[in-house]
Image: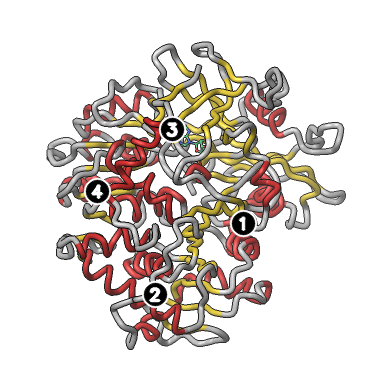
Amino acid sequence: MSLTHASEQLEAEAWGSARAQLAGLPGGGLNMADEAVDRHVRQGRGSVVALRFVSPGREREDLTYAQVAARSSQVANVLRDQGIQPGTLVCLLAGRMPMASIATLGALKAGCAVAPLFSAYGPEPIRDRLLAGRASILLTTADLYQAKIAPVRRELPNLHRIWLMGPGATEASGPGIASLDDLMSAASEDFDQLSSDPQAPAFVHFTSGTTGTPKGAVHVHEAIVAHLATGRSVLGLRDGDIYWCTADPGWVTGTSYGLIAPLACGVTSVIDSADFDPIRWFDILEQERVSAWYTSPTALRMLRKAGDAAWQGRDFGALRQVSSVGEPLNPEVISWGSAALGRVIHDTWWQTETGAIMIANSPGMDVRPGSMGRPVPGVEIRLARHGPQGERLAGPGTALDFTDLPDEPGEIAIRTPWPSMMRGYLHDPQRYQACFADGWYLSGDLARIDADGYVWFLGRGDDVIKTAGHLVGPFEVESALMEHPSVAEAGVVGLPDPLIGESICAFVTLRAGWAPSDALAQQIRAAARQRLGAAVAPRRIEFDASLPHTHSGKILRRELRSRALAAGTSPAGPSP
Ligand code: AMP
């Protein structure tokens, strides 16, 4: 079945109307930060609040479009004055704080590509991503520097500059360390060398595959066309909206839909600096009068778990549109949303590589609970058939064999190109090429499409794990486990978990001389948490005398998972 909003003309129209809303730069240029921020100032909307930060103590800090424009220009001037060339990868390791958003936009203005890193990772995943990015400059906070970078700094010889933001930045010292605030103090609020190539890299988002090191998906300035289009057509953003995206800025959703899309649409984006807390979240929805909300199934399930008293009697009258992404959205959660929030939750689907929402239940659509919706205008989806071993099947004279039968499973494929399509994996052209065939991008996700064109998620075609909305590569976890002196081999899988979707479970074989015990399992788990961070470490360690292998010696994770499910291995363990 070819699901398409279709002809090239329609495709051009879909993205064309977003393009027409953008200002552009002379000579066909385009800069994401200029379009997201300064365009609104030039068009007389400088006094609108762009970013509303809510501090852990619930104080608000509002930044208008004019203020964000001025301060991001200062950052751009600092980068230029310090000799950071356009095209340089600027890595960013920070929580939800004003300077992180401003620095991101400033780097984009200066033509640098920004690589946001997840601040809950332990030192090792951060080191591996900095190495994969060959990073020479990192923007972070004094606390994160001490906790995550200092322990691995000696392994990062290319990391020459570390600019600190927020508390303690000015007092910190060390090789290459400077305070971004200090650097900005004398910088002009006008920046006149705006980078303008629409195809220049803007973001590098690291993501995981089944094997190997993390992949850096490269996205370009032109991606803002898709952010603007889907911000309006899927998230329903309109003038005057108070919008809240709950995703962490270290993941693609937190940047694309926490920063760029709402700014492109000219709305006020709420950014909560504190960690998840159900009462706090209901308070923010109610008291900030959030009108459009983009969140995840895990967060919704946790809110539901908080009990009816947490939401009863509250006024969510301002809330118009609720959307979800990242994992399957259970129908029970949709029913809960209708009762608690008074709104139907709209599921959406996309991934790091697609750069923007590709499939959605858009406002006004008849939502079928359990379905991810239909392709957004401008996107054409087909399902590529797989064989019994999960291998892609070829068609007559073609690399792919598509199914046109309703409800027949296949791999979600997207016709190339679209504006936010990744343009490469950093320093890894072969892995990038392997994602495409016959002009289609292959997502690795399995789905079926019903007779009315609704797409239903069936699972991943590979071994990556989605835990609490975070994509985790089993190889990375296995490697960290094998650093423990007792571990000979490890196989890591995701097991179904009612709250966080999948829970990470590790099966390990021990080296000679070590015996399984609860104490050893605790020790291995604690060591993994230290290295990887709690969000990525296994919740459960199982000892297994012989892990299943393929003929070529690779661990058969799928068999491990089936065995665990058959044995009723409970993924339950302490919360992360
Ligand atoms: P990431 O690249 O980290 O954003 O993760 C993308 C992956 O998350 C997709 O390939 C899917 O496996 C999963 N995913 C995203 N949205 C949904 C959804 N609505 N339903 C089910 N799985 C989803």
**To which residue does mark 4 refer?**
243
Q: Disc 1 and disc 2: Cα gap in Å? A: 26 Å
Judge by depth and name the residue closer to the eye, 335 or 230: 230
Element type at marker 1? loop
Mark number displayed over residue 152: none
Q: Which amino acid does label 4 sit on?
A: Tyr
Q: Which amino acid does label 3 sit on?
A: Val
Judge by depth and name the residue closer to the eye, 291 or 428: 428
Q: Disc 2 and disc 3: Cα gap in Å? A: 34 Å
**To which residue does mark 1 refer?**
426
- 479 relative to 435 in the view: left or right: right
When the figure is inspected, residue 476 is found, relative to residue 191, above or below; the finding is above
Q: Disc 4 and disc 3: Cα gap in Å? A: 25 Å
Q: Which residue is drawn at 34% across and 41% down?
A: 16
Q: Are marks 2 and 4 in contact (CB under 8 Å)?
A: no
Q: What residue type is labelled 1?
A: Leu
Q: Which amino acid does label 2 sit on?
A: Gln
Q: Residues within 10 Å of mark 3 (few under 14, many from 20)?
A: many
Q: Does label 3 point to a residue whose CB lies under 8 Å from ligand 1?
A: no
Mark number displayed over residue 379: 3
Element type at marker 2? loop
Q: Residue at x 61, y 25 (%)?
A: 568
Look at the image and name its color scheme.
secondary structure
